[in-house]
Amino acid sequence: MSDAAQLLARSNSLRRRALACTPGGVHSNVRLAGPQVFIDHAHGAWLYDVDGENYVDYLLGQGPNFLGHAPAHIVDAVAAACRKGLIYGGQHKLEVEATEAVCEALGWADMVRFGVSGTESVQAALRLARGATGRTKVVRFEGHYHGWLDNVLTADGPGGWGTASAGQLASHLDDFLVLPWNDAGVLRDTLDRHRDEIAAVIMEPIMINAGVIEPRPGYLEAVREACTRHGVVLIFDEVISGFRLGLGGAAGRYGVRPDLATYGKAMAGGWPVSALAGRADLMEHFGTGKVNHSGTFNGSVMAMAAVQATVRHLAEDPPYSAITAHGTALMDGLRSIGTSHHLPLRVAGLPVAFHVSFGDAEVYDYRSLQQLDLGRYTRLAPELVGHGLWVAGRGVWYVSARHGADELDAALTRFDKAITEWVS
Ligand code: PLP
C-alpha cells in the first residue's frame, strides 16, 4: 500500500461501503467534487477524520458552523428542550420566542415562517410573491444560487442560462428572467418593459456563492427603488449572508430593506432550519390560508431551541469583530504567501467570507468573475485539503467565531507548505 493509501485507509474503506449503498458515496451532489475523506468528529474550528488527520475548517459545513462545531451552550439548550418532546404537531412557546428573536435581530421584518432548508424557504418566498401580486415572472441573476429545485437551479450553458441537471424540466425556468447582477440600468429596463408581469426580484444581496462579490455602491438602493415603483416584491436570499454579515445580515450591512428574505445556515449554530421573514401585509397571506406553506418539521423543538440560543448568543456576545480580525489577518497572510511564491493569488471579499482564486480582473458580476483563473484554484484545493485545510474547490472560505490565533498560525503554515509542494 502506498503512503497516501495507508494514510486514508479507514476513509477508503468507508468510501467503498458508501459507494455500494449511496449514489456517488455522498448524500448531496455538492459533495461529489469534495474530498472523499470521512470525518470522525469536529470541535471548535477543527475537523478530525477517521484516520487521525486534522483539518482547520474553512468550509464550516457550507456555512452553518458559524459559532464553530457543536457550540456547547447551544447543544445544551437543544438537548434540554428536546427532553420535553421533539415535534408536537401543535404550537409551542419556543416557536414564539425564536420568531421574536429573529424579528428583533433583523430589525426590518414583521413576521417569520420557519422551514427546514434554505431551498424550501426560497420556494415559499417565490410562491408568496406570486400569490400576493397575482403575477408570474421572477427576475433573478447570473451566478446566484437559490437551491437545487427545478425552478431555481441553473447553469451557464452555450445557449445561455438553462437547466443544470438531467431530469430538470426546462419549462420550470420559463417564468424566470436571468439578468447580469450589479447593473442597475439592466434591472430598471427589464422592470419597465415587463412591469405588470413581474412578481419578484430575487438575489443574493452579496453574491457569496460565486466569488463573494459585494453590491456596487447604490445598486441595492436602485433595485429597491425600481421594485417599489413597479409593485415588485424584492426578495433577498440571505441563506448564507444572514446572521453572518451581522445580526441584520446584508440588509443591515448595506441599509436596504427587502420585502421578503430567506435565512438558514448561520442562524442556528449548525441545526437544519431555515426562515422566511417579511412584511406583515405579505406574510399574512400565509395566515389567511390564501397562500400555502406547510411542513411536518417546521418549528420543531430542536430547531426552535437552536435558533433561539444562537440568535441570543449573537446578540449578547457578538463574535463579529473577532471574526473580522481573524479573517483580515488570514486574507493578508494568504496574499503574502502568494506574493512570496510569485503567484497571482487573488484574495477578495469580506473577512467573514472571502474568495481565493488566481488572476487579476475587475470583478463585479458572474461574467467578470470568469476572467479569473478559477480552475487553477480548483486544482489547488485538494492539495490544501491534503495539507490539513478543509476548503472547497469553488474558492469560498468561511470564518467562524472559533478561529483564533492557533488556527491562523496553522492555516498559514499549512497553506505555505501546500503551495510550496504544489508549485515545485
Ligand atoms: N440560497 C442560498 C443563497 C444558498 O447559499 C443556499 C445553499 O447554499 C440555498 C439557498 C439553499 O439552501 P439549502 O442548501 O439549505 O437548501
Image (cartoon, rainbow, N blue to C red):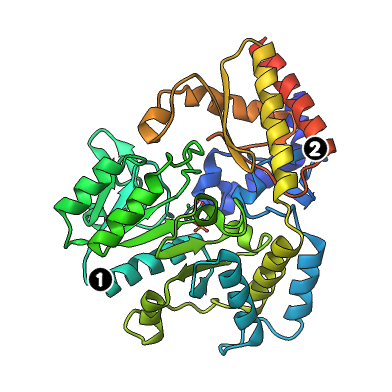
Q: Would you say 183 lies left or right of 71 here?
A: left
Q: Is residue 392 above or below residue 317?
A: above
Residue type at numbered disc 2: Glu
Front-lying residue, 376 or 252: 252
Q: Is residue 2 above or below residue 235?
A: above
Does the residue tagged 1 have its C-beta within 8 Å of any atom of ligand 1? no
Q: Would you say 175 lies left or right of 69 here?
A: left
Give the numbered dot on residue 324: none
Front-lying residue, 214 or 12: 214
Q: Is residue 190 above or below residue 379?
A: below
Q: Residues within 10 Å of mark 1 (few under 14, many from 20)?
A: some
Give the residue furthest to the bottom. Answer: 90
- The C terminus sits in image quarter: top right
Disc 1 element: helix
Residue type at numbered disc 1: Thr
Front-lying residue, 117 or 6: 117
- The percent coordinates of residue 394 (x first, y second) are 53, 35
Which residue corresponds to mark 1? 133
Disc 2 element: helix
Q: Residue at x 21, y 53 (%)?
A: 191
Q: Is residue 275 above or below residue 28?
A: below
- The percent coordinates of residue 139 (x first, y second) are 28, 53
Give the numbered dot on residue 407: 2
- The percent coordinates of residue 141 (x first, y second) are 34, 46
Q: Is residue 28 visible?
A: yes
